[in-house]
Image: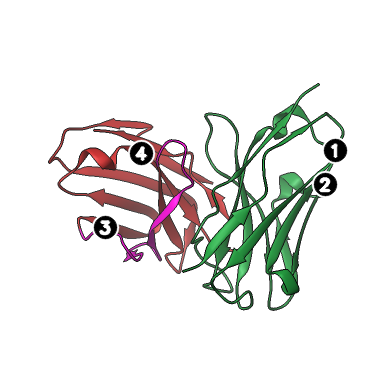
Chain colours: A red, B green
Amino acid sequence: VLTQSPGTLSLSVGERATLSCRVSQNLRNAAVAWYRQRPGQPPRLLIYDASSRATGTPDRVSGSGSGTDFTLTINRLEPEDSAVYFCQQYGGPMYTFGQGTKLEI
Amino acid sequence: QVQLIQSGPEVKTPGSSMRLSCKASGDTFDNSAFNWVRQAPGQGLEWMGRFITVIGMTNYAWTFLGRIRITADRSTNTAYLELNNLTPDDTAVYFCAKETSLPLGWLDPWGPGTAVSVST
């Protein structure tokens, strides 16, 4: 089970967002990805293997963590960062997603 | 650049079945897996299962066992999702997503989604 917090985060342009994803079982290989989903669009991969940026992810977006606690950090927030962010674990053949964090700018 | 092209919206009645398609273009079909993820209105993402093309193996989420089948046709670079015994709770947007970091990995890219409505 993946638990994301907070449910909703309201911040201003230029601030930093810190999103949390807690996994119920230890992921020994940091098998966590982060996705951004804007309204009416499919999810887009931002981070894989907990901290590797996908192609096109700006360097103000970063991922960290290990074991059971993972974090997505977005620096210097911009209006287009408004979206719902999901984490996903792929530590075993049954994948699961967190419930999402809505980020409002 | 890989693109995933999904079939059009569907309206179904309770108890019926659906078959959605996802055609991959611009990349090799092999050495990848095709995942299906659904999103009910206003809800989060729910992983349903995947088909690993190179070995023809599937993994399914427990909640769908017995009424789900994911297949793929290498000749047309197309993956399919079949879901049986539909109920109104199956109303959702269904996304296909490619996975190239096997055996276990992240999903990228995603298709645009197919809206399915189940009602009487």
The residue that disc 3 covers is: A62
Check contact, mark 1 vs mark 2: CB within 8 A. Answer: yes
**Looking at the image, is mark 4 or mark 3 earlier in the sequence?**
3
Pick the front one: A3 or B93: B93
Q: What's the mark number on residue A24?
A: none
Q: What's the mark number on residue B85?
A: 1
The residue that disc 2 covers is: B67
The CA span between labels 4 and 3 is 16 Å
The residue that disc 4 covers is: A83
Pick the front one: B80 or A104: B80
Is circle 1 on the same chain as circle 2? yes
| Chain under callout 1 | B
Range of magenta residues: A38-59
Pick the front one: B6 or B30: B6
Amino acid at pointer 3: Ser
Q: Residue A37 in the image: x percent, y percent?
A: 42, 43
The CA span between labels 1 and 2 is 7 Å
If the image is split into quadrants, where does the C terminus of chain B sit?
top right
**Looking at the image, is mark 1 or mark 2 earlier in the sequence?**
2
Q: Residue A29 in the image: x percent, y percent?
A: 45, 69
Residue B44 visible, this angle: yes
The CA span between labels 3 and 2 is 39 Å
